[in-house]
Image (cartoon, rainbow, N blue to C red):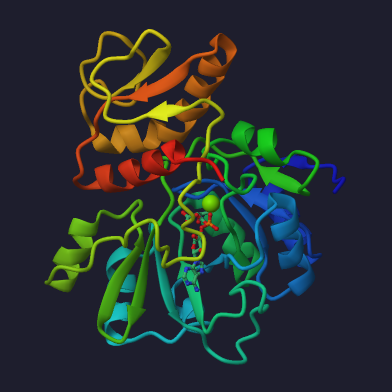
Amino acid sequence: MDRKTEILSPDQEGITSASALLAAGGLVAFPTETVYGLGADARNGRAVATVYQAKGRPSFNPLIVHVADLTEARKYAEFSQTALQLATAFWPGPLSLVLPLKQNAGLSELVTAGLNTVAIRVPAHPIGSALLQAFGGPIAAPSANISGRVSPTTTAHVLEGLRGRIDAVIDGPACKVGLESTILAVSGSTVSVLRSGGVEVERIEICLGHEIAQPQDPETPQSPGQLLSHYAPKALIRLNALHPQADEILLGFGGQPDAALNLSPSKNLQEAATNLFAYLRQIDEIATQHGNSIAVSPIPFVGLGLAINDRLSRAAAPRH
Ligand code: TXA
Ligand code: MG
């Protein structure tokens, strides 16, 4: 792959260029509230194939389709009452719904990796939404990183991994949520969590009025992309560390005076989520420079802490 990778401004001119590149089958990275996505026209099989190629992503791992609003989403997926309830409550926002695929809706089969379901979401971001409006069609977008690496929350992260492999990136601000969307599979009135993420499971349960199944044992992924080792930094990682050992540097949470970086000194999970991927990259850099490994303070398993712990345990998992 040898592409020029333009850096587009986040104004109308940049959005128009990005939209034209997508229409021509190009690959454009763009900010969403969760992480940067690597977009391609979801109806164009050749474009979608180059997404897998640019990321080095196995083609059995389907992509999330991004649309401007619920009306657009209903062109591609069958919504049960429960799915409508969730979409109405949380869109636009960091929630992806895996729903029955509408036949003959025109999505490339590569997007869904041949499954009869489709993951779909409406992002809440001025630039992402403007791009979807301008393009006027569905944009398939996985996170804009090389497969298996840490997801990007800034333009610089995108360029670090994908410069020369994609046509453009829209240069927006750092992503506020900082973690990928929560993925729910909805079948009729049955809901299960395929990936914890930016919408807390507790809020989903309040919306539904009952509890739902927690994420599955990571050894048996429900989402083809939920491979155990993911988000892998180069240095080794030890979780739930109260203090760093001699050869470790600490990624802290809460009042940790010996932390090299602190996800949230005030123990704010939202702040920790926003910082997580950027700090993992930074601390990995420091650790590998000094031949250290990384220790991470305990993070509570509530709210966004579920998604933070999920990403950390994947980062710490044995590498394949
Ligand atoms: O926040 C996000 O969701 C970001 C931004 C860019 O929107 N996107 C993202 O995409 O995280 P990606 O490709 O990194 O993760 C998508 C996940 C994968 O684990 C994939 O296996 C799962 O969604 N997925 C997609 N379609 C699916 C389907 N039909 N059934 C089950 N899982 C599906
Ligand atoms: Mg990803």
Q: Nearer the viewer, residue 166 or 318?
A: 318
Please report the residue visible at 42 percent of the width from the left and 41 percent of the height from the top: 178
* Location of residue 179 in the rendering, given as x and y in whole percent from the top left corner: 41, 45
Q: Nearer the viewer, residue 104 or 11?
A: 104
* Location of residue 66 in the rendering, given as x and y in whole percent from the top left corner: 53, 65
Q: Is residue 110 left or right of residue 306?
A: right
Q: In the picture shown, does residue 281 fall above or below 110?
A: above
Find the residue positioned furthest to the right: 2
Find the residue positioned furthest to the bottom: 103
Find the residue positioned furthest to the left: 209
Q: In the picture shown, does residue 284 fall above or below 13?
A: above
Q: Is residue 276 left or right of residue 174?
A: left
In which quarter of the view is residue 181 placed? bottom left
Q: Nearer the viewer, residue 212 or 45?
A: 212
Q: In the picture shown, does residue 307 fall above or below 250?
A: below
Q: Is residue 211 left or right of residue 230?
A: left
Whether residue 165 is visible, yes or no, is yes
Please report the residue visible at 78 percent of the width from the left and 59 percent of the height from the top: 26
Please report the residue visible at 85 percent of the width from the left and 42 percent of the height from the top: 4
Please report the residue visible at 24 percent of the width from the left and 62 percent of the height from the top: 214
* Location of residue 209 in the rendering, given as x and y in whole percent from the top left corner: 12, 72
Q: Is residue 310 left or right of residue 125?
A: left
* Location of residue 70 in the rendering, given as x and y in whole percent from the top left corner: 43, 75
Total numbered labels placed on residues in the image: 0
Whether residue 177 is visible, yes or no, is no
In which quarter of the view is residue 83 placed? bottom left
